[in-house]
Amino acid sequence: VSDFDWSSIDTSHLPSSYKTNSQQEKELLQLADHFFLQYTHLCPDRKPLFIHPLNECGVQKFVSTTVKPTLLPYPDMYYWSGCASFVCDYLIMEPLKCPITPPSSLYSPTTILKYQRGNCFDFSVLLCSLLIGAGYDAYCVHGYATLEMCSLDQTQELCPRLRKPPEVPEEEDPNKYRIRYPSEPHSQFELQQKAKEEETESTQEEEGEEEVEVEKPKRDPLHGLRVHAWVLVLSGKRKVPETFFINPFTGNQHSPRDESFLGIESIWNHRNYWVNMQECRKGCKDLSFDLSDSFCWEIMFSESNKASQLPPESPEKDTDDMVSHLSNALGEPVWNQWESLCLTSLLPTAEYENPFSRGKKVILYDKAKQEKWAAYANADGLVERLTVYTDSDCTEELEVKEWFKHREDLLYMREVNKQTQLITDHFRPGHPLLIKAHSYTSLEPETGHTVEFYHTARVDGLWKRCETATEMTEYFLGRDDFMHMRHTEFGVRDQNMERAGGTADANHRPIVKIKEYFHRNPEKPADEDVEERTFMVIDDVIQLTYHLELHDTIASKVVFCRVIGREKREDEIFLSRENTVKYMPWSSEKHKNMRHLYNLLWELREEQKDLKQQVRDSEAEMLNILMVREDEEANIKLSVSIYSAAKRQEQ
């Protein structure tokens, strides 16, 4: 129930056209009364039309004069989605005093913008004014809707943020002559047993549903009678492909076939007024929105520029003269040119950028809660939070998603899994460390981190790195050497150095094994193209596994082992048939030469040194990332957008 007293609003600043009616307005009201009398005479069983309510000054006004086409000087307001989201966020919803009758008054958009509140009719008139100003073929609708839509109850709906995009059906194979293999054989007995189990489960579900139905609320006794107002956007202008509805309370787009809309009485824009003459027993899904069809829609003012061809003695002659008198030479209604306040002057940039009059907006969905803030309202740049719950009572949190704006560290979204406490930060392009996403449970080193990078900006092509206390896995894309993954296993640090107070940089984790994976290089023969390369650093073993050709079944391998009983030296390479195991059935004779294996082992020894240094560099990079992220979270800074005039003036 609204606690705002509309009778106490200040109307002294309003123009004189709000407080009195000119001669043309009086003639317009006479036409509206004449149309209303004809309608009630021809359709006595239908509800009264919403055609000339009182305005905020207590003066009767024709509804079309309340629609003021306005294009606000903000980029988002050029599109219907921006207009709809602004109206539903900027205004506070007030229910109708009587749910089954339209309101007795309809205030101007200027007053609604000033006090930031209104009912569904006020929402619709303001939204329609913005849409028409942006070039859309929009109309205000007086009709009937469900209880949930009229009362802005979205607790039974799925949050739009959680809706999955529609799956694109896979195209069938156009080759109808391809070989179709027979399906796997199935046991008929097992199928019968499975069918019996499904029957028993279905009966149990039906019994459970019967129990739940007892707890369900009763059917709305006013179903089909609840009055609601929304916006109709016809196809055609602004390249709108299909006609759709906009619920002004939520800003969501709906199809005319939506079952939440139960019927339409009339529609109007800034030029004319139409009465629906079609049956709405099945809602709005079968309605025709061809407004030129006189059998479906009864128009108030004829849109033809020519005078009506009626006989001189017709009683309608005076009415037609009044209609032509109320239109200028271009066919534009004169009431659109009457004195009115400018909506743009009532909506300065500061108020547009902070649309929430109560500081924030909270929306309850089915097992979810959505919170919205204006930009710069929170010190950390938080503008939206979505909390997902495991139950409908919203007692146990399952997941929390947060969206940010204007952060200098380019963080724009954070996901927190409340079950596992896993946090995932997402960053926009441009971070100094080229981070794209970071998953963690703690910013302490070696506690489990997964970092994704913008790999096209990196020289090494690294796109993801996963690190724990015992291993590190790196994934690459687009490398010239065709490497796509590197896996490193670590041992336990020397406990004596830790007790002596050595830092983590000085006391590195010992590298146990490094394993690299490569894609196929088509320019090399398969027996010369390495697929896997393993370095057992502590055991001093190097193993190479080569790719397979199409006709091969067993991969070629080469293993270099340490000679038992011989000490390891850094600058010495000892090769003999005892410490070399090779199986290369598809290779040529040169690969079986010991000289070739000696050169290969020499190269691998040098590459092993480089690999160990690359692993140490990766460890140092991860430590640097954690230090930078910890500092960024401790000292959050927001950048001022060049488009935020109000924030720049504040600075």
Image (cartoon, rainbow, N blue to C red):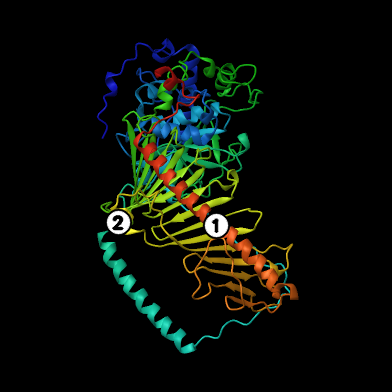
Is residue 198 in view from this perspective?
Answer: yes
Quarter of the image holding residue 229?
top left
The residue that appears at 34% across and 23% down in the rendered structure is 115
Identity of the amino acid at label 1? Answer: Lys
Residue 249 in the image: above or below residue 111: below
Where residue 565 sits in the image (x, y, percent)?
49, 75
Please report the residue visible at 51 percent of the width from the left and 72 percent of the height from the top.
Answer: 566
Q: Residues within 10 Å of mark 1 (few under 14, many from 20)?
A: few
Q: Which label belongs to residue 41?
A: none
- Where does residue 184 sit, x and y in percent of width and height? 56, 83
339 and 586: which is toward the camera: 586
Of helix, strand and loop, which one carries label 2?
loop
Instruction: Kindly state the secondary structure of the residue where label 1 is placed.
Output: helix
Q: Nearer the viewer, mark 1 or mark 2?
A: 1
**Quarter of the image where the C terminus is located:** top left
Q: Are marks 1 and 2 in contact (CB under 8 Å)?
A: no
- Mark 1 highlights which residue? 609
Residue drawn where x is 52% and y is 35% of the image: 80
Q: Judge whether 378 appears above or below 20 on screen.
A: below
From where the camera sits, is residue 46 visible? no
Q: Nearer the viewer, residue 223 or 120?
A: 120
The Cα–Cα distance between marks 1 and 2, rounded to whole angstroms, is: 55 Å
Q: Which residue is mark 2?
A: 391
Q: Earlier in the sequence, mark 1 or mark 2?
A: 2
Please give the count of numbered marks on the rendered protein: 2
Q: Quadrant of the N terminus?
A: top left
Residue 526 screen position, x and y as percent = 70, 69
Neighbor class of circle 2 (other Cα within 10 Å; few <14, some 14-19, many 20+) is few
Rendered location of residue 49, percent (x, y): 43, 33
Residue 557 relative to residue 223: left or right: right
Q: Amino acid at mark 2?
A: Asp
